[in-house]
Amino acid sequence: MDRRTLMGMIGVGVASAALPAAAALSKPGRAPRGFLWGTAGAAYQVEGGNVASDLWVLEQLKTPLFAEPSGDACDVYHRYEEDLALVARLGFNCHRLGIEWSRIEPERGQVSEAELAYYRRLLQACVRHGLKPVVTFSHFTVPRWVAASGGFKDPANVEAFAAHCARLTRAMGELIHLAATFNEPNLSTVVRWSGLGEKIRPFIESIQKAAGASQNAPNWSSPMLGGESHFDGIVAAHSRAIEAIREAGGRFPVGLTLALPSDTAAGGDDGPLKRKQAEMMDRWLAAPGDFIGVQTYTSTPVGPEGDLPPPPGTELTQMGYPFTPDAVEGAVRMVAARTSKPIYITENGVATEDDSRRIAYIDGAIAGVQRLLADGIDLRGYIHWSLLDNWEWMHGYKPKFGLVAVDRKSFRRTPKPSAAHLGAIARRGGLA
Ligand code: BGC
C-alpha cells in the first residue's frame, strides 16, 4: 500500500505576528540575507520510543500497515546535540523539528515538566549552534488519549491542543523562530485524488477499530487515519491554538504546512486540475495564520477521474513518485497566486539510494528557488526533507530521504555528499 494512501486517510491540520521581513537580495539571483536554509525532521520519525503516541498503538497492532516499527528511530532524543552541531557545520542557518505532544502530556492534564525542560534545552541547543528553530506542534501524531476520545472530532481535544500550544509558548516561546501548528492537514485530500483512498477505506477503518479495541476506547480515531472527517476539528484547533499562543505572549509567526504536489493537466483539460488544487488548498489558505509552508515532492498528471500514472519511462523515486526537481517551484507559484502570505518551503526532497540523484534533485529545486526570488515572490526559506535517513511512516526505514545516513544499530551518522553540497548552497545563498 502506498504511503500517500495511508497518509491520506489522515486528517491532520492550521493561522498574526511579526514575520521576519524579506531582506534585500544580497546578490542578483541569490537568496536574501535572512533567508532560511534548513534541514528537517519530525519528532516521531527521529526521536525513538514515543510510546505514549497514538502511532505507537497503531504500530503495535502488527498489521501490514507499517513495514516495520519505529522503535528507537534515529535516537535523536539522545543525540540532538551532535546532529545540530553537524547541521551548523554544514552551513545551514535553521532546523525544522517537531515537539511530541505525547511526551509533554502523556495523559490528559498530566504535564511533564521534565519533558518541557528537555524541549527547551533542544531549542536552546539550536540557538547556540546558530540555527533558527522552526517548530511543528503536531506532525501527524497525537497523544493516545486524544485518539482514544475521537481525535479532533472531540471539541475537548481542540481545546487541549490550544492549551498545549500555549504551554509550549510559555515554556520556550522566545526561542521559537517560526511555528507550524499542524503538518500537512490537507494530505487526505491529495490522497483522495490519487484514487486509492476509497479502495483502502475498509482496511483503515478496521485498523481504527482494532486500535480502539486494544485500548478499550470505542471512539478511537487517529487523526492520521481519520482523513477528512477531522478537518473541521483541525481548522478549529489551529485557529484556537493561534489565539492561545498570542494570549500566552507568543510573538513568533504561526502558520501551517501543506502537502502540495505540483500537478499537470492531462489531455489539455485543466478543469480537474483546478478542482484538485482548490480542494487541497482553499480551506487551509483561508484559515488564520502568518505564513504558508509548502511541502512538495513531485508532480502528477491529473485527469477527469483523478491522478493518472506517469508516462512510461518516467524516472521514479523510491516512493514511486516521478523524479521532478522543478515541482517545488510550481507549487510555490500555485500558492503565491492564491495568497499574499509569505511562503516558506518547509519540505522538499527525494527518496533515493543514489545520492548523486539527490544532488541533481537539489540543484533543480534550488534553480527554481532562485527563479522564484528573481520574480519577486515572497519566498523566505528552503528547508530540505530530511536531515537523517529516518522512519518513513508505513514504509519503515527503506526510503532514504536523508542528507545523512544513520546506522540502524550504532546510530552512527554519516553525511552523504549531498549534505555538503546543499550546505555550500546555503552558505553561498544559491547555486555556484
Ligand atoms: C511528511 C513527512 C514525510 C515526507 C516524505 C511529508 O508528507 O510531512 O513526515 O516523511 O512527506 O514522505
Image (tube, rainbow, N blue to C red):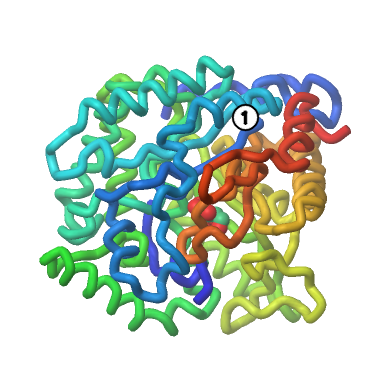
The answer to which of 145 and 234 lies nearer the viewer is 145
Q: Quadrant of residue 144?
A: bottom left
Q: Classify 427 as above or below 48.
A: above
- Find residue 18 and report its horizontal and vertical position in percent: 47, 22
Give the residue pinned by disc 1. Answer: 87
- Find residue 96 and report its horizontal and vertical position in percent: 52, 36
Q: Quadrant of residue 152?
A: bottom left
Is 359 positioned to the left or the right of 41 in the image?
right
Furthest residue to the right?
432
Q: Classify 429 as above or below 364.
A: above
Q: Classify 203 as above or below 150.
A: below
Is 352 positioned to the left or the right of 162 in the image?
right
- Find residue 101 and report its horizontal and vertical position in percent: 29, 41
The answer to which of 33 and 87 lies nearer the viewer is 87
Q: Identity of the amino acid at label 1?
A: Val
Furthest residue to the top?
128
Total labels: the figure holds 1
Furthest residue to the front?
410
Residue at 56% in and 18% down: 129
Residue at 30% in and 29% down: 168
Can see residue 48? yes
Q: Quadrant of residue 275?
A: bottom right
Q: Residues within 10 Å of mark 1 (few under 14, many from 20)?
A: many
The answer to which of 354 and 120 lies nearer the viewer is 354
Can see residue 287? no
Residue at 44% in and 65% down: 68
Is 115 positioned to the left or the right of 265 in the image?
left
User: Which part of the image, by quadrant, shows the C terminus?
Assistant: top right
Secondary structure category for the residue under label 1: helix
Q: Classify 432 as above or below 170.
A: below
